[in-house]
């Protein structure tokens, strides 16, 4: 049988894995559009004579919901708790899966697309986006408030692994649905099954959340110290649990809880690290992967297979981050990643300028993506779940996450139009952003390795 230490580790791993199902759904719902994007274009955009700006807005409409969900995440998670906020997100994931796959439901006739169907499709995608926005803020917050300081980076990074694994899963699902099928069937029915498939993990997530505890930080903030101690005791020794609870309670007493109580710098760093994560252009590669590969001369089935390859790269290099984040620290990984991303994007831009497409482009897309996934992908979420003091964490994370989704929407919705203006210039723009992200980390971001969440508070008290 397991000894006490092993039982505590098993308990911590179990609740972490359940929480990261929110990350898996975040990735799944965000990337499902990649396989359906061209079918949506034919069914809802081209058939009505609408332009590329409408197409870009439709592909990115979920991001409007993500911004809303990010903004609301602070209020929801501080009012009803981290656990219940995740249950709300799970319900929204199920609604968007079923609704996006059948936007004609109740109001319109299937097979007769019109502006009303386009509107309802976007409404369902926005609902899903709210769920993604909630999950993107609350999942890393939940894990960081549960995890011990010495392994917190790894456990929060597991949430990023779940995100990229969700992306990989949906690439396989989309590829499996489209494989061997005619283009007419995919444009008529295939894209619907791609969206509906997301209901399965959404239902599973909602059920499993009833078996995880609320976080001890939220319980303590809510005046439920005994319940907080009981949760801490299941993860730590009784003496360590009492010590952590005492540290948590001291931070509750010390701060007014106002957003600017620890100065503006911590809020600005949280916002900028979120914005740079998107401005480097990662979600362009994710949302438009099949289209990019088709522009390189790949057939539709082949382009989706190459998207699967990209998903495997995401998973492998996220594992690299998980294995190194608590040993090397956050800043070194971010700086290394910025260098690799800049090399990848500038190289793609140079190849595009010379009209060279093919294996070389794929290689540099992989270099860019691998660099992102071992650094900015997971480490951004680690840092914004760590740097904010207890009493302002939910509100500050809401602002940082909303800023991230706003940046995501700006980048992904403008990509189709920018690529029409200048393909090489668009990729070089993302390369410049990668270099700026390096300077930002070097100059402004503190190292958070091995610091408890409560120690973060004293860091900002000293510097504000």
Image (spheres, rainbow, N blue to C red):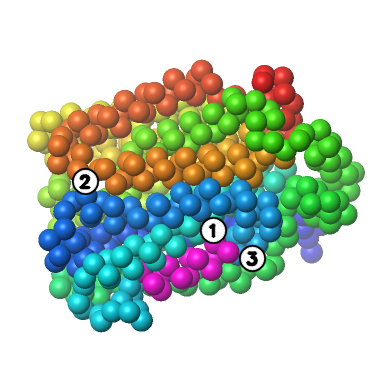
Q: Quadrant of residue 166?
A: bottom left
Mark toward the start of the polypeptide (2 vs 3):
3
Tell me the number on the disc at residue 269: none
Quadrant the C terminus occupies: top right
Q: Residues within 10 Å of mark 3 (few under 14, many from 20)?
A: many
**Residue that sits furthest to the left in the current view:** 355
Q: Residue at x 40, y 47 (%)?
A: 314
| Sequence-wise first label, 3 or 1 | 1
Q: Which residue is mark 1?
A: 22
In the image, is 379 to the left or to the right of 41? right
Q: Are marks 2 and 1 in contact (CB under 8 Å)?
A: no
Q: Which residue is mark 2?
A: 416
- Residue at numbered disc 3: 209
Q: Is residue 87 above or below residue 53?
A: below
Q: Position of residue 194 (x, y in %)?
A: 33, 68
- 415 lies left or right of 29: left
Does the magenta segment cover residue 91? yes
Q: Position of residue 262 (x, y in %)?
A: 68, 28
Compared across the picture, whether 357 is left or right of 314 comes to left
Q: Secondary structure at mark 1?
A: helix
What's the distance in space between the residues labelled 3 and 1, CA to CA? 10 Å
Most frequent secondary structure within the magenta stretch: helix
What is the C-alpha distance between the residues marked 2 and 1? Answer: 29 Å
Q: Quadrant of the N terminus?
A: bottom right
Q: Give the residues drawn in magenta, as a range.
A: 88-100
- Mark nearer the viewer, 2 or 3: 2
Above or below for 312 versus 355: below
Q: Residues within 10 Å of mark 2 (few under 14, many from 20)?
A: some
């Amino acid at each position: 049988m397991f000894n006490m230490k092993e039982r505590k580790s098993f308990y911590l791993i179990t609740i972490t894995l359940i929480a990261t199902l929110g990350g898996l759904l975040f990735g799944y719902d965000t990337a499902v559009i990649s396989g359906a994007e061209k079918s949506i274009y034919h069914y809802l955009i081209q058939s009505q004579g609408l332009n590329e700006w409408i197409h870009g807005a439709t592909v990115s409409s979920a991001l409007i919901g993500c911004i809303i969900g990010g903004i609301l995440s602070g209020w929801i998670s501080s009012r009803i708790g981290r656990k219940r906020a995740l249950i709300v997100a799970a319900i929204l994931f199920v609604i968007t899966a079923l609704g996006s796959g059948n936007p004609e439901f109740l109001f319109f006739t299937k097979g007769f697309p019109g502006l009303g169907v386009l509107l309802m499709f976007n409404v369902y995608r926005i609902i899903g986006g709210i769920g993604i926005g909630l999950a993107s803020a609350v999942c890393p917050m939940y894990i960081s408030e549960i995890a011990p300081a010495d392994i917190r980076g790894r456990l929060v990074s597991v949430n990023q692994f779940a995100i990229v694994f969700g992306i990989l899963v949906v690439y396989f699902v989309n590829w499996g649905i489209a494989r061997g099928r005619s283009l007419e069937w995919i444009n008529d029915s295939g894209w619907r099954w791609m969206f509906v498939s997301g209901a399965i993990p959404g239902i599973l997530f909602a059920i499993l959340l009833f078996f995880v505890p609320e976080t001890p930080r939220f319980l303590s903030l809510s005046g439920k110290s005994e319940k907080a101690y009981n949760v801490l005791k299941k993860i730590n020794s009784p003496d360590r649990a009492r010590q952590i609870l005492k540290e948590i309670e001291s931070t509750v007493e010390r701060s007014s809880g106002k957003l600017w109580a620890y100065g503006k710098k911590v809020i600005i760093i949280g916002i900028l690290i979120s914005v740079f994560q998107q401005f480097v252009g990662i979600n362009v590669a994710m949302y438009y992967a099949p289209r990019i590969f088709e522009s390189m001369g790949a057939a539709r089935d082949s382009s989706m297979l190459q998207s699967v390859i990209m998903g495997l790269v995401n998973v492998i290099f996220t594992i690299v981050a998980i294995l190194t984040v608590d040993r090397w620290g956050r800043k070194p990984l971010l700086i290394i990643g910025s260098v690799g991303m800049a090399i990848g994007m500038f190289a793609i831009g140079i190849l595009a300028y010379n009209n060279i497409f093919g294996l070389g482009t794929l290689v540099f897309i992989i270099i860019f993506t691998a660099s992102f996934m071992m650094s900015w992908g997971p480490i951004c979420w680690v840092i914004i779940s760590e740097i904010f003091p207890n009493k302002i964490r939910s509100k500050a994370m809401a602002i940082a996450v909303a800023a991230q989704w706003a940046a995501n929407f700006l980048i992904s919705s403008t990509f189709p139009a920018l690529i029409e203006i200048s393909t090489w210039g668009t990729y070089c723009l993302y390369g410049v952003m990668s270099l700026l992200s390096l300077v930002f980390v070097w100059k402004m971001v503190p190292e958070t390795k091995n610091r408890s969440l409560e120690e973060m508070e004293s860091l900002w008290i000293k510097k504000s």
